[in-house]
Image: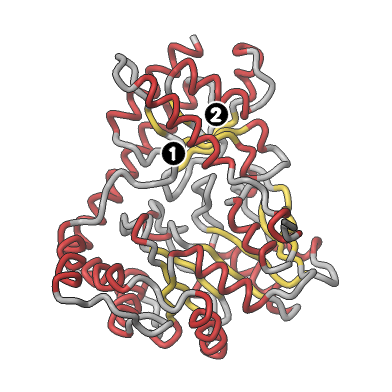
């Protein structure tokens, strides 16, 4: 059987490979006095709040399980439109909002609609690995530009301008970012978009962690810049609906019909039950609960980052959103007799029973020196993890 070159270009998702190893070890130590603590997967420990769960059950009971339009239910698109106004004071018409089978489907649709074979998309190194693979699946090429703490691990307009070539089609950014939890300064994002727009390019911004911003300076949507920005969002992170597989994208009006044709053929529609459930995300009680949980995520960050720093696992830039810590672990390599963060991740897993994610997935420039910790687990679990790391590194 001949495997396509496209499929062979896609690297393994090492986050999941490490997760499999962690799950195996977790089974072995489940009944010991040191069961596995999982700080490797970017998934909130919270589940959908009560009203959302009830809405899903009601949809099933009422038989509301048939296909919807490929763009999704207009009533839910209108709720999202209102949320943009309520949260960000942005007028985003429901007609520009497309519901998708998770943010992954939104990224796939955007890439298929806009990228030709051989086109180059500029992205920061480090960045979420699946984003570059969406570009590759559309026969484009992701060009990773090394970033540092000085730029908050984000691209700058100067970098974009210097890297722009004949094959460059645009940029794919994330704010807040996975794995760093850092956002692009709004003024810098505007400058980047101006560079891209002046060259007839596209600006795609992954905003799936936007609801989990902790700093008003950065907690603004890129959609505030102009209507040519393409924003990707999701119900997974802020709305705590990871397994429900429901996301959305905001696109220019002229692109809606193109996206709709692709969605009709590739996905038919997003999950109907998930759409009915998501309607309840915007009820007052649900939004109040989400904001309480956002405060909890911030409290976890405020404990966890200083604790990592004190252990010598330095986080160069304080995350302003999401629930990640991008920690430089190179100072402990010699002590633990490991050569890079991949080996260190398995050492931590085996010896401390704490599952973490090595930097390998997220880039090449400095990733071998970094580990991504997820602080999406409970405060109690974070305390246990720090205690175990302290013993390992003492």
- For the residue labelled by badge 2, is the local secondary structure a helix, a strand or a loop? loop
| Rendered position, 86 above or below 335 | below
| Rendered position, 89 above or below 373 | below
**Pointer 2: residues within 10 angstroms few (<14), some, or many (20+)?**
many
N-terminal label among 1 and 2: 2
- For the residue labelled by badge 1, is the local secondary structure a helix, a strand or a loop? strand
**Pointer 1: residues within 10 angstroms few (<14), some, or many (20+)?**
many
Q: CA distance from mark 1 to mark 2?
A: 15 Å
Residue 226 percent coordinates (x, y) = 54, 80
The type of colouring in the image is secondary structure
| Rendered position, 226 above or below 381 | below
Residue denoted by label 1: 374
| Residue at image point 27% right, 70% down | 273
Q: Quadrant of residue 55?
A: bottom left
Q: Quadrant of residue 73?
A: bottom left
- Nearest to the observer: residue 319 or residue 150: 319
Residue 167 percent coordinates (x, y) = 82, 70
Residue 2 percent coordinates (x, y) = 75, 58
Q: Quadrant of residue 297?
A: top left
Residue denoted by label 2: 314
| Rendered position, 268 above or below 127 | below
Q: Nearer the viewer, mark 1 or mark 2?
A: 1
| Residue at image point 42% right, 82% down | 71
Give the label on residue 45, or none. Answer: none
Residue 274 percent coordinates (x, y) = 30, 67
- Nearest to the observer: residue 15 or residue 225: 15
Residue at the limit of the structure toward the front, as seen here: 1
């Amino acid at each position: 059987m001949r495997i396509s070159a496209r499929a062979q270009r896609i690297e393994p998702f090492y986050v999941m490979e490490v997760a499999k190893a962690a799950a195996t070890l977790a089974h072995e130590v489940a009944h010991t006095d040191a069961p596995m603590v999982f700080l490797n997967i970017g998934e909130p420990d919270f589940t959908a709040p009560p009203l959302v769960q009830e809405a899903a059950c009601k949809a099933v009971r009422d038989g509301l399980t048939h296909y919807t339009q490929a763009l999704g239910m207009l009533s839910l698109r209108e709720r999202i439109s209102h949320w943009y106004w309520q949260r960000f004071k942005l007028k985003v018409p429901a007609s520009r909002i497309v519901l998708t089978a998770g943010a992954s489907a939104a990224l796939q649709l955007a890439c298929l609609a806009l990228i030709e074979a051989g086109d180059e998309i500029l992205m920061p190194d480090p960045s979420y690995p699946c984003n570059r693979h969406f570009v590759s699946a559309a026969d484009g090429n992701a060009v990773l530009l090394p970033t540092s703490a000085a730029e908050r691990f984000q691209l700058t307009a100067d970098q974009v301008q210097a890297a722009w070539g004949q094959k460059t089609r645009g940029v794919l950014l994330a704010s807040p970012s996975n794995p760093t939890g850092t956002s692009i300064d709004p003024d810098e994002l505007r400058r980047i978009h101006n560079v891209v727009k002046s060259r007839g390019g596209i600006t795609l911004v992954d905003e799936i962690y936007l609801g989990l911003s902790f700093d008003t300076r950065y907690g603004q949507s890129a959609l505030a810049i102009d209507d040519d920005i393409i924003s990707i969002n999701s119900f997974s992170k802020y709305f705590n609906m990871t397994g429900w597989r429901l996301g959305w994208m905001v696109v220019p009006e002229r692109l809606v019909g193109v996206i709709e044709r692709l969605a009709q053929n590739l996905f038919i529609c997003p999950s109907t039950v998930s759409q009915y459930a998501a309607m309840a995300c915007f009820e007052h009680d649900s939004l109040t609960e989400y904001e309480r949980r956002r405060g909890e995520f911030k409290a976890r960050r405020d404990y966890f980052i200083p604790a990592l720093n004190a252990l010598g696992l330095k986080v160069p830039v304080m995350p302003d959103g999401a629930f990640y810590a991008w920690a430089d672990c190179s100072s402990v390599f010699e002590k633990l007799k490991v050569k890079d963060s991949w080996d260190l991740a398995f050492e931590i897993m085996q010896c401390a029973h704490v599952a973490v994610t090595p930097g390998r997935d997220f880039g090449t420039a400095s990733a071998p020196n970094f580990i991504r910790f997820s602080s999406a687990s409970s405060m109690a679990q974070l305390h246990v993890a720090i205690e175990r790391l302290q013993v390992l590194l003492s």
